[in-house]
């Protein structure tokens, strides 16, 4: 005989409560005493019951009309990141005709990431890893285990996941070659978070070995394929203020770099702020380049030298890929090009 899935009724009987009380204990939506809730959850663990069956529920009600969007950093930071906002806007635009809504989920375990219990009963038809998806992300395993279709933007890169990525390596390589072509040799990197654990500062060998994100890894690899090993300072989040702190750290070196390659435009703006606070002129005294192609009003009329990626298009394509998955079709992975934009923040090193 096949193995039968434990039921809510069996959990209720084991806990000595009614099925409705057991249901309220799982949902957290009713006045259930904490001791009763703990008894129900203990019974569920004993029986191997993970919560109301999302598949059975979807068969009863049809699709939920909800697509989860996992944002790697705290949602507060995501709403300050123009790249994340453009991606989410593009996804929402593509899903809107079908009446599907987005449920934003933090992928940061320190700031509100869903628990396994919550994931087991989350009524989502599909999930998008919109930013900062690690290949070993524990949320990914939970959704894959439930059979929920997953689309990832720039990672995680797993066989079970439909992937949309940009040419991170190629774009970073073009950027590094541009900086090298100007004559720079003392180069440093202001890096995006290598893992979402709040770490910041100079990156040592041990930290390099645990880089969690494919885009960070590809951009750093491309830079070092041109310059060899370079100093790297990691920002704990992708905001201008952290770029400023990272820039101050890199510029405090005894032989300061003549060029700083930032892994995002927001970090690049922060580095420029740090340089100018120290009395350095950009680009006369210091070249600063970024990655993304966002608007940078902090710089006034100056145009940042950067790699431009198709942010809104990425979101729209992701939404269409989700629609294909919900229709029962597995779309092909997508690899989008990027291009170098030379602006006013890069120049030859000072004589």
Image (cartoon, rainbow, N blue to C red):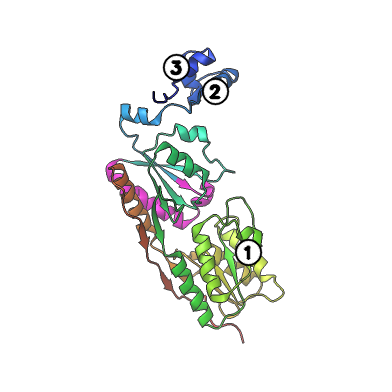
Residue 305 in view here: no
Whether label 2 touches label 3, CB < 8 Å = no
Q: Disc 2 vs disc 1: which is toward the camera?
A: 2
- Between the residue at mark 3 and the residue at mark 1, the CA separation in whole angstroms equals 55 Å
Q: Decide which of 88, 8 is in the foreground and name it.
A: 8
- Pointer 1 residue: 233
Which residue corresponds to the image point at 51% horizontal and 66% vertical from the top-left?
A: 219
Most prominent secondary structure in the magenta stretch? helix
Q: Is residue 233 magenta?
A: no
In the picture, the quarter occupied by the C terminus is: bottom right
Which residue corresponds to the image point at 61% horizontal and 61% vertical from the top-left?
A: 208
Whether label 2 touches label 1, CB < 8 Å = no
Compared with 127, 5 (above or below) is above
Q: Which mark is residue 46?
A: 2
Indicate the secondary structure of the residue bearing disc 3: helix
- Between the residue at mark 2 and the residue at mark 1, the CA separation in whole angstroms equals 47 Å
- Pointer 3 residue: 9
Residue 235 relative to residue 91: left or right: right
Q: Disc 2 vs disc 3: which is toward the camera?
A: 2
User: Residue 136 in the image: x percent, y percent?
Assistant: 52, 49
């Amino acid at each position: 005989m096949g193995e039968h899935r434990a039921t809510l009724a069996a959990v209720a009987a084991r806990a000595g409560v009614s099925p409705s009380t057991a249901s309220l204990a799982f949902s957290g939506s009713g006045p259930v005493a904490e001791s009763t809730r703990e008894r129900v959850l203990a019974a569920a663990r004993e029986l191997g019951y993970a919560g109301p069956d999302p598949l059975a529920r979807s068969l009863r009600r049809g699709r939920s009309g909800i697509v989860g969007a996992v944002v790697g950093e705290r949602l507060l930071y995501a709403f300050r990141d123009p790249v994340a906002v453009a991606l989410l806007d593009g996804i929402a635009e593509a899903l809107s005709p079908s009446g599907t809504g987005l449920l934003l989920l933090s992928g940061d375990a320190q700031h509100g990431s869903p628990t396994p219990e919550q994931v087991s009963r989350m009524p989502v038809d599909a999930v998008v890893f919109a930013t900062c998806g690690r290949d070993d992300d524990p949320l990914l395993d939970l959704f894959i285990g439930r059979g929920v279709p997953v689309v990832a933007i720039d990672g995680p890169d797993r066989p079970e996941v439909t992937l949309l990525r940009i040419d991170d390596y190629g774009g970073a390589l073009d950027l590094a070659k541009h900086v090298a072509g100007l004559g720079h040799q003392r180069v440093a990197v202001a890096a995006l978070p290598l893992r979402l654990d709040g770490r910041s500062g100079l990156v040592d060998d041990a930290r390099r070995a645990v880089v969690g994100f494919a885009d960070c890894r590809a951009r750093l690899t491309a830079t070092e394929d041109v310059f060899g090993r370079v100093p790297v300072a990691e920002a704990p989040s992708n905001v201008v203020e952290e770029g400023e702190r990272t820039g101050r750290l890199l510029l405090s070196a005894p032989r300061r770099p003549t060029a700083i390659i930032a892994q995002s435009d927001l970090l690049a703006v922060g580095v420029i702020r740090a340089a100018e606070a120290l009395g350095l002129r950009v680009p006369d005294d210091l070249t600063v380049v970024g990655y993304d192609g966002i608007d940078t009003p902090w710089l006034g009329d100056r145009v940042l030298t950067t790699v431009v990626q198709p942010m809104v298009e990425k979101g729209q394509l992701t939404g269409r890929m989700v629609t294909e998955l919900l229709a029962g079709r597995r779309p092909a992975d997508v690899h989008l090009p990027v291009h170098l934009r030379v602006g006013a923040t890069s120049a030859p090193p000072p004589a």
